[in-house]
Amino acid sequence: MRLTVVLFALTATLAQADVFNTYGYGPRATAMGGAMTAEANDYTAVFYNPALLVERKDVNFGFNFQFYRMASEVKSKDLAKPLDLSAATAPDSVGTSVGLLFPLGGKVKNHLALGLGVYLPTALLLRVNIPSNDMPYWYRYHASPERLILHLGAGIKIVEWFKVGLGVQALADLIGSGANVSVDLFSKQVNSGDLNAYLATRVGPVFALAVTPIKRLRLGVTFKWEMKLNVVIPARVDLEGIGTLGFTVSGVAHFTPHTLNFGAAFDAAENLTFTLDGEWQNWSSAPSPYVSIDIDLSGPTLEALGLGSALDVKSGTQRPGFKDTLGVRAGAEYRVSERFAARLGAFLRPTPVPKQDTQGTNLMDNTAIGITGGFGFNFSDPLEIFQHPVQIDLAGQAQFILPREAKKEAIDDEPGYTYAANVYGFTAAIRYDF
């Protein structure tokens, strides 16, 4: 029993899509609705479009802080049936991120630049929690911030109007090579035991293009490979004189689908820029979000009793039935002066999750409408420690998850319920060009 508890503790909340996709990377991008595929002009290009890294000529560094909180409303439609609401509200998303853009000099000067983006959650570097299918929880929000995110990229200028970008995003698989325990049931003693698990690096490629057909118009395309964290923890318990209990706990968490972003940025005036992005995501390839447990009880004694396979258990798995989505993002920036800029944005993010009317699935999600805004300003260092102006950016965001209903049959253990939520938060950053 204790070993079982340990294994489930190791597989402690499911996270889908990463925090940059959900809330944005950097206050400028957040304030402009995340429509940055053709407009990212600093270290955040490593996420939005690595090809744009080469646009900046100076070393650029930034430090970000973000905080987001959900206010949700989940109501049972049948008070006679219990409904587990322990995951009805996603935890706060609190974290910091840093970024670095480094243009290379020498013979490749102005033709090659490197970028780095790292997100660090405040509480945990990684949480993996695969919840029970009888528990309603927020599929996209419940723990996506609680993981380390790493993006590396390079921008290459082919000609003045055409750039390409390459990058990688990194995650880790939680793999268990095995837990082995020997138990003497007659003396009620554990004779031996060992547990071995490790994090294996997983990377996904990123490909990007940036084109400037005319002076005031910029176009961009970015494709990110899907990412996921595989959890596999096998265990074997030798019950001396009886048989062997073998079981494997497995699942997939932190899934992000193949994503294609395409966007445009247009300078309506020298001090006014509009941006527009489309975002296609291949959610139809998403794996089951629930844990899989296989139990195999075998041994000579059980075989002699004809119970060699009678006690084996294999949990059923089903595809979640997600659909591909096509979302839209828009933003605007008005540069009042060289010292101050105001920004606005909005986005529409369709849900891939079908109605949860069937038995054994309770994934809460729906189409979200986002309203964003913020500003940025810079100032010269009064102590003259820094040669260039210091840039401060602030942004706020509100996401409105539209109301939805899960209808359950009378034979279902869970009652039908309605749900909706709003997510509010802000992000702040300091940027500097060396």
Image (cartoon, rainbow, N blue to C red):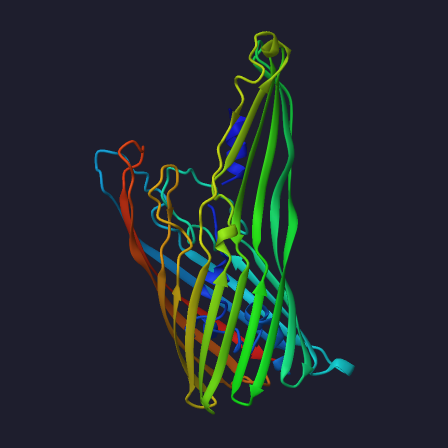
Measuring from the top left, give residue 309's x and y in whole percent: 56, 18
Taking 158 as reference, is 121 above or below it? above
Q: Nearer the viewer, residue 73 or 375?
A: 73
Horizontal and vertical percent position of residue 181: 62, 23
For residue 397, which quarter of the picture?
Answer: bottom left
Q: Residue at x 27, y 44 (%)?
A: 417
Q: Residue at x 28, y 36 (%)?
A: 409
**Seen from this angle, which residue lies furthest right?**
107
Residue 171 in view (yes/no): yes
Who's the residue at 57% across and 41% down the image?
Answer: 231
Which residue lies at the image location 53% right of the left edge and 17% below the top edge?
310
Looking at the picture, how far across and down is residue 362, in whole percent?
A: 37, 43
In-front residue for pair 84/299: 299
Q: Quadrant of the C terminus?
A: bottom right
The answer to whether residue 11 is above or below residue 141 is above
Give x and y (percent) for residue 164.
65, 74
Tell how many labels. Answer: 0
Question: Can residue 146 be seen at all in this image of the molecule?
Answer: no
Relative to residue 132, is residue 107 depicted above or below?
Answer: below
Q: Is residue 209 left or right of residue 35?
A: right
**On the image, which quarter does residue 332 sit in?**
bottom left
